[in-house]
Amino acid sequence: MKQAIIRPPSSAFRHCISAHPEHHILDLSLAQEQHAEYCRTLSDLGLKLIRLPPDERYPDSCFVEDTVVVHGNRGFITRFAENSRRGEELAVSEFLKDYVELGFARKPATIEGGDVIHLPHRLVTGITRRTNLKGVKQMSRWLGIRSDTIEDPSIIHLKSHVTYLSRNTIIATEDFESHPILEDFDKIVVPREEGYAANTLTIGNAVLMSQEHQRAQKLVAEAGFEIIPLDMSEFEKCEGALTCLSIIF
């Protein structure tokens, strides 16, 4: 059985790093309810949940995906670009050390899990505001797997714009649909106004998607995928999404 590490939003979640225009009206209680439903969904899909306690020292710590990249029997503990997030990775590495062999990003490398797309035989990693080339090279070397790169220093994380659905199919925003690194994939392109829906999480035959973006859901369903819509409104206000909330290994 696969496992998923999750960490609920803490009481400090309102202070997350975000430039979202509705950040100021974030509803903490609703975020906690949405996170609980997300966890129930993972469990219903057959994942064993490992629950780390909330940590009020780190407002963004529910976004556990950013702390590590796991491939096979190895994990690469990341190094955050934002000083305020450094330390989130400690609880994750303490748990994972009993399951996988760990390597650690070293400065001046920065890398976050939200930039790393796992494909059947390689990775694709974003060079973004949060991840630099040194981080990608250190990760690829430790994990022993090729990682191609997509460079866009204007974005926070690549997986906010591109995710892998399975069956050689990706979902992407219009800005990334024609990138040469992605040319061999079948593509579902979300409408520009539904760009948030490009962040999806595939578990088995099911694709978790933001419930608000129904045109994108229809496109994915028409491509033959089972859709599970989830309300992600409060996490969107913190510029987080479905993949951010778990480490699946």
Image: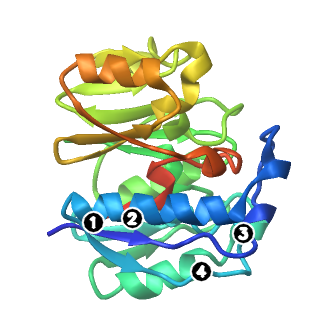
Q: Would you place residue 133 above or below residue 247 in this image? A: above
Please name the amino acid that badge 3 sits on: Pro
Q: Residue at x 68, y 72 (%)?
A: 86
* Res 142 visible: no
Q: Would you place residue 81 above or below residue 240 in this image? A: below
Counting residues from the start of the chain, the first of labels 4 and 3 encountered is 4
Q: Would you place residue 113 above or below residue 199 in this image? A: below
Specify the label residue 43 is tagged with: 1
Residue identifier under label 3: 59
Label pair 2/1, CB-CB below 8 angstroms: yes
Please name the amino acid that badge 1 sits on: Ser
Cα distance, mark 1 to mark 3?
Answer: 25 Å
Q: Position of residue 11 (x, y in %)?
A: 72, 75
Label 4 CA crowd tier, 10 Å (few <14, some 14–19, many 20+)? some
Please name the amino acid that badge 4 sits on: Pro
Q: Residue at x 81, y 43 (%)?
A: 19
Counting residues from the start of the chain, the first of labels 4 and 1 encountered is 1
Cα distance, mark 3 to mark 2?
Answer: 19 Å
Please name the amino acid that badge 2 sits on: Cys
Q: Nearer the viewer, mark 2 or mark 4?
A: 2
Label pair 4/1, CB-CB below 8 angstroms: no
